[in-house]
Image (spheres, rainbow, N blue to C red):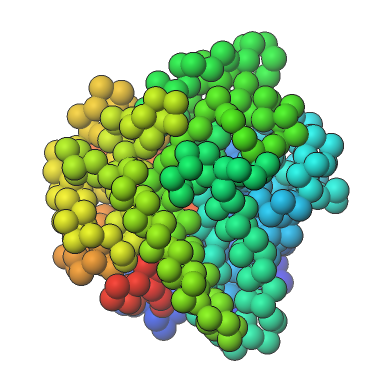
Amino acid sequence: MDRTAQLTARVTGRGIAYDPPATAPSTAPSAASLHVRAARVLASHWTGTSTVPSRYLYPHQWSWDSAFIAIGLRHLSPLRAQTELETLLAAQWGDARVPHIVFSPSVPLDAYFPSPDFWRSSTAGRAAGAPRTVQTSGIVQPPVHALAAWLVHRADPGLSWARGFLARVYPRLAAWHRYLLRRRYLLRRRDLGGGGLVSVVHPWEQGMDNSPCWDGPLARVTPAAAGSFRRADLVHGAVGDRPTNLDYGRYVRLAGEYRDGGYADGEAEFAMEDPSFNALLIASEHALARIAAELGSPGAARHARAERLTAALVERLWDDASGMFLCRDLRGGPIRERSVSGLVPLLLPGLPREVTRALTGTLRGPHFAARTGLVPSYDLRGPAFEPNRYWRGPAWFNTAWLVERGLRAHGEKAAADALRSAFLRTAGDSGFAEYVDPDTGEACGAPGFGWTAALTLDLLHDGTVESGEEGGDRG
């Protein structure tokens, strides 16, 4: 079937439906048009086994992008959504980490930096069990994958059971969580603070790469020499939207040192406990418990672990004065910067009621109440706020989706509905931009961005988060 036919066909059952499905909230032209436009973005980014975030700026497979993309793809093709996750997990390392990039051998080396010849995964990562048949990066990204797998399964349980989807991904997801939760006395560990939370060892791992939260810790890092690398991102992205050369030089230095140490986890120059990374692990731990139960195994132990992690999150990262969670620098203590990372834990069902109330109040307050109705990535009144530069202020659609889900799970229906409407309006108006100015809605970054289109599709489907259950089923 050629591309034009693909985009106009309705394939019943388990195929791809590019026309608005019967479960869409309405058949109004605006909703129908938004659905078709979002579906076209995902069709144009499909490689046959996975979806690239952007054909030009991000031409490979990214870890948490694929999780969010699968959540949207399940409304078009549950089979494709399952394949998205399976392709990513096939690149899992022997120590069970899921790498943040899986490189396509068909993409030229100079199309993206750091490229496979920088990471050298199959040689530098040999001791950690890096795969020989595919090139990857050596760091990780937030663990949204079990939540995505659960939602994808629920989109078409019959197909999932017929293909053995859950039975095949569950062992890999469980091993991925074990890798992250290993304690500090083990050689390969991520609980570097010893308090039960996962630490990230590079800003790229946390996903919000150049958040002002990292300015202080990164100031300790000597940047790589300017002439030692070439930034491919500036070829396709506006300089004012991207991290500075100084920040990028520090990212390269940290990644190179981690590589040269054989990707072994231990003492790290950059080691942060981050609210959103840990909240997404907890949400996925709850989802993994549901997957286990679906497969006939007890899930109670995993729910209990998620509750313990939630308690550790509150104990170590909650800040009453800010009314939100803060990042913690393991060398310097709490980082007193407000970022959207500190609001993402609203997704969790086990938060104390006073914490939930404070988070919803912070969302409505002057630090995050942007004129678009979306959630800025950084404090609107913060000294480092920039409305267009990557994670230093712009509003992102994946974090809006997470916060909307959290609001709905905690009974904040009006606020969730308002955020949902703002998301859909701005996503459509911006051409599914990677991110937008939080006050004007001006498109920034890559146009036609994968997870923006995918999560638009998810929010176009009626359904609510089940009471008291993060990761409840939509659609």
Horizontal arrangement in the rendering, residue 30 relative to residue 229 (left or right) = left
Q: In the rendered image of this protein, does residue 345 appear above or below residue 387? A: below
Q: Which residue is at 55% across, 61% downward?
A: 145
Q: Which residue is at 34% across, 61% downward?
A: 348
Does the image show residue 205? yes
The quadrant of the image that shows the C terminus is bottom left
Position of residue 3 measured from the top left corner of the image (x, y, whole percent): 66, 64
Q: Quadrant of residue 394?
A: top left
The quadrant of the image that shows the N terminus is bottom right
Q: In the rendered image of this protein, does residue 52 appear above or below residue 33? A: above
Q: Which residue is at 64% across, 85% downward?
A: 161
Q: Which residue is at 64% across, 38% downward?
A: 265
Horizontal arrangement in the rendering, residue 125 relative to residue 299 (left or right) = right
Task: State the count of labels.
Answer: 0
Horizontal arrangement in the rendering, residue 192 relative to residue 383 (left or right) = right
Query: In terms of depth relative to the viewer, which is nearer, 400 or 346?
Result: 346
Position of residue 7 measured from the top left corner of the image (x, y, whole percent): 58, 68
Position of residue 149 measured from the top left corner of the image (x, y, whole percent): 55, 69
Position of residue 206 measured from the top left corner of the image (x, y, whole percent): 49, 41
Query: In terms of depth relative to the viewer, which is nearer, 316 or 382?
Result: 316
